[in-house]
Amino acid sequence: MQILNYLIIILFAIWCFSEIAINLIGFKNRSKDLSGSSDKFSHFVVWFSTIPTILLAYLIQKQLIFDTGFGSLSSLFPLLAYLGCLFIAFGVTIRLIAVFTLKKQFTVKVSIVEKQEIIETGIYKIIRHPAYLGHLASLLGIGLILGNWVSLMALTVLPLAGILYRIQVEERVLLRYFGETYQEYASRTKKLLPGIW
């Protein structure tokens, strides 16, 4: 059980550091934005639906909001925690692969950068928004580790709403910039889940 606790701490730290690094890279690349203010606060919406939700989920799990053990899935521990660790590792990996595939085109706010092109290699051959898939997978993992279905629901539903808004904003900008080329790419790929949606 102690090994599992160390694993959880290490993976959560890796997730935190990777998000900090991704945001630093994305802010640096955004300085070349050619599209004006296209973001429509979507970066804020994603992070506002993520950071406070993690805190809320933690407070629920620690019974600081519901003090009756409401929503506890402790009978499934440590299985859920190991599954959660896998989701965090998967999420961080997918997110980093997506960011490094985009290279200088990756920005934290919806932007069109100089020499922008549609990336159709690697994971982008299958889905258009793998970084968001990785983000959601990591949050699902955190929710599973917390072992409370209310926390799990908060960590999936609220950030998913933020991501769906972000995807809508981003696709509108890309469609406006690339036109039929992006429409054709979108017709061959899924938004978030390979083979599903």
Image (tube, rainbow, N blue to C red):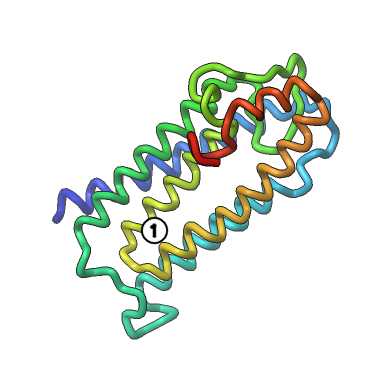
Quadrant assignment, res 13: top left
Residue at the limit of the structure toward the right, as seen here: 36
* Closer-to-camera residue (119/14): 119
Image side of residue 97 versus residue 184, left or right: left
Left or right of residue 56: residue 165: right
Q: Residue at x 71, y 29 (%)?
A: 30
Please say if 144 is above or below 7: below
Q: Residue at x 40, y 78 (%)?
A: 64
Work out which quarter of the rendered image holds the C terminus and state it.
top right
Relative to 111, say whether 162 is above or below. below
Most foreground residue, 64 or 98: 98
Quadrant of res 145: bottom left
* Type of the residue with mark 1: Gly
Q: Secondary structure at mark 1?
A: helix
How many labels were placed on the picture? Answer: 1
- The location of residue 179, given as percent across then percent down, is 81, 25
The furthest residue to the bottom: 68
Say if 69 sits above or below 150 in the image. below
Q: Residue 144: x and y, percent?
A: 34, 57
For image coordinates 70% across by 17% down, the residue present is 117
> Dividing the image into 4 quarters, which one contains the N terminus?
bottom left
At 21% from the left edge and 56% from the top edge, which residue is drawn? 79
Residue lying at the far top of the rendered structure: 115
Nearer to us in this view, 136 or 190: 190
Residue that carries the numbered disc 1 in the rendered image: 143
List x then y, in percent, for residue 23: 58, 37
Q: Residues within 10 Å of mark 1 (few under 14, many from 20)?
A: many
